[in-house]
Amino acid sequence: MRQWDLDKVDKWVDEVALLPIAKFYPSAVAKDVGLPVQEVFIKLQELVNQKKLICIWEVRCPECLVTINELTSLDLSKASICYLCGDEIITSPEIVFPAFKINPQYKAYIKESAKKKHPGEPKKIFGAYSRNRKLYHCHS
């Protein structure tokens, strides 16, 4: 994989930082930039290390698939209760999914940078992001 291919992920994150998106999944990024999800996940982890992103781990009920908990660290010793079906769920790798949030400080930095580049002019966002916003937005 060429480095400039992975630079598409950086650009995607910077553009999404300007949108009202609560969190996103590696699969959404991979689909938009046309790269394998495994490579995108590694790049997103690098952005976590750079403090641009925050990684969260969603615990989903295996029965009804609703997100029942969000963990900031991958702790497989926690149990949760599903608020829909009432089952007690023991956290296991099969029901934990990574998601990412833009670090609020980085989001503010990107917004300020966009204002300086184009004062008084709205930032033009790549069409796929605005047309498919629901694809990335997840209700918290």
Image (cartoon, rainbow, N blue to C red):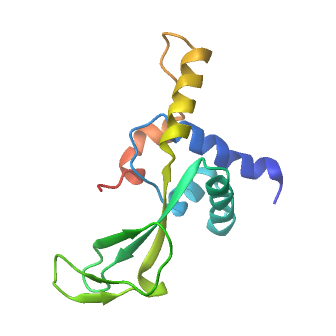
Looking at the image, which residue is at 33% across and 71% down?
69
Question: Where residue 125 sits: x, y (%)?
Answer: 52, 31
Q: Say whether residue 72 is left or right of residue 29.
A: left
Q: Which is nearer the eye, 122 or 32?
A: 122
Residue at 22% in and 80% down: 82
Is 9 placed above or below 94 here? above
Locate the C terminus and report the quarter of the image it occupies.
bottom left
Choose between 111 and 37: the one closer to the eye. 111
Residue that appears at 60% across and 47% down: 52
Residue 96: percent from left, percent from top: 44, 78
Judge from the rendering whether residue 23 lies leftward or rightward of residue 15; answer left or right: left
Using the image, determine if residue 39 lies above or below residue 51: below
Q: Is residue 91 above or below residue 122?
A: below
Q: How many marks?
A: 0
Residue 38 is situated, as x and y percent measured from the top left of the image, at 65, 69
Looking at the rendered image, the quarter that the N terminus falls into is bottom right
Q: Quadrant of residue 139?
A: bottom left
* x then y, percent, for residue 112: 54, 24
- Residue 63 appears left or right of 105: left
- Residue toward you, 104 or 12: 104
Q: Residue furthest right?
A: 2
Tell which residue pokes out farthest to the top in this image.
120
